[in-house]
Image (tube, rainbow, N blue to C red):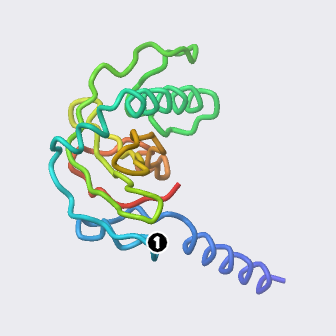
Amino acid sequence: MQSIIDTARNAASAVTSSVAPAHHHSEEDHAKSLPADATAGPIKSIDEEGLLVFEDDAVRHGVLVKIRKLALEDERHGLGEVAALNLTDAEGEIKKGIDYYHPKRYFTVTRATGTDYIGEVEIEQGKSIHIRAHKAGAAHTPTFHSIDTRPSDEGGAVFKTGEALVWFDY
């Protein structure tokens, strides 16, 4: 009976590690987990192209709405995704919003569907989020896609500014 339990645990562990996103990356790994149809550019400091994407009203709004949603879910379910930002009070109400939004660096990923922008946006001194936006083509406006999250014991959605910026697809 114990061998069956051990086998099940080993199988579950193998499946979990093969499908769970890995978050222990170095800067050189930023493009390692790309889909086969994608090509990544180099990581670069924010420039005019990056500002046009990450400062776009719809992208910025999408990011701020997602952070608020994560803060409320943290309080409700104890997830710890944005706990490092201390956005809620003891009653679970939002006590402050994000008043600092500073894009720092990014890289692009070219795909058949357009260009993905993976960027680091500092939202408090020394604390950043990694976001993904998409632009279907030069004539299209960018859209917010998602915020990179990792297990809450590793910081959730809040990264130290300057941590490895890597591709994520969720």
Number of labelled discs? 1
Which residue is found at the position 46% from the left and 31% from the top? Answer: 62
Which residue is found at the position 49% from the left and 52% from the top? Answer: 151
Amino acid at circle 1: Pro
Residue 98 placement (x, y as % from top left): 35, 22
Sort mark 1 into few (<14), some (14-19) or many (20+) by Cα contacts within 10 Å: few
Q: Foreground residue, 104 or 109?
A: 109
Q: Quadrant of residue 97?
A: top left
Which element is circle 1 on? loop
Which residue is found at the position 51% from the left and 28% from the top? Answer: 71
Residue 154 placement (x, y as % from top left): 41, 51
Judge whether 62 appears above or below 163 on screen: above
Q: Foreground residue, 87 or 133?
A: 133
Q: Foreground residue, 98 or 14?
A: 98
Quadrant placement of the N terminus: bottom right
Residue 150 placement (x, y as % from top left): 46, 52
Q: Quadrant of residue 158?
A: top left
Outermost residue to the front? 139
Judge whether 31 appears above or below 162 on screen: below
Judge whether 1 appears above or below 139 on screen: below
Q: In the figure, is residue 142 to the left or right of 55? A: right
Outermost residue to the bottom? 3
Q: Foreground residue, 56 or 25?
A: 56
Q: Which residue is mark 1?
A: 35
Judge whether 123 appears above or below 53 on screen: above
Which residue is found at the position 26% from the left and 37% from the top? Answer: 52
Q: Quadrant of residue 72?
A: top right
Outermost residue to the right? 1
Q: In the figure, is residue 15 to the left or right of 21? A: right
Residue 152 placement (x, y as % from top left): 48, 46
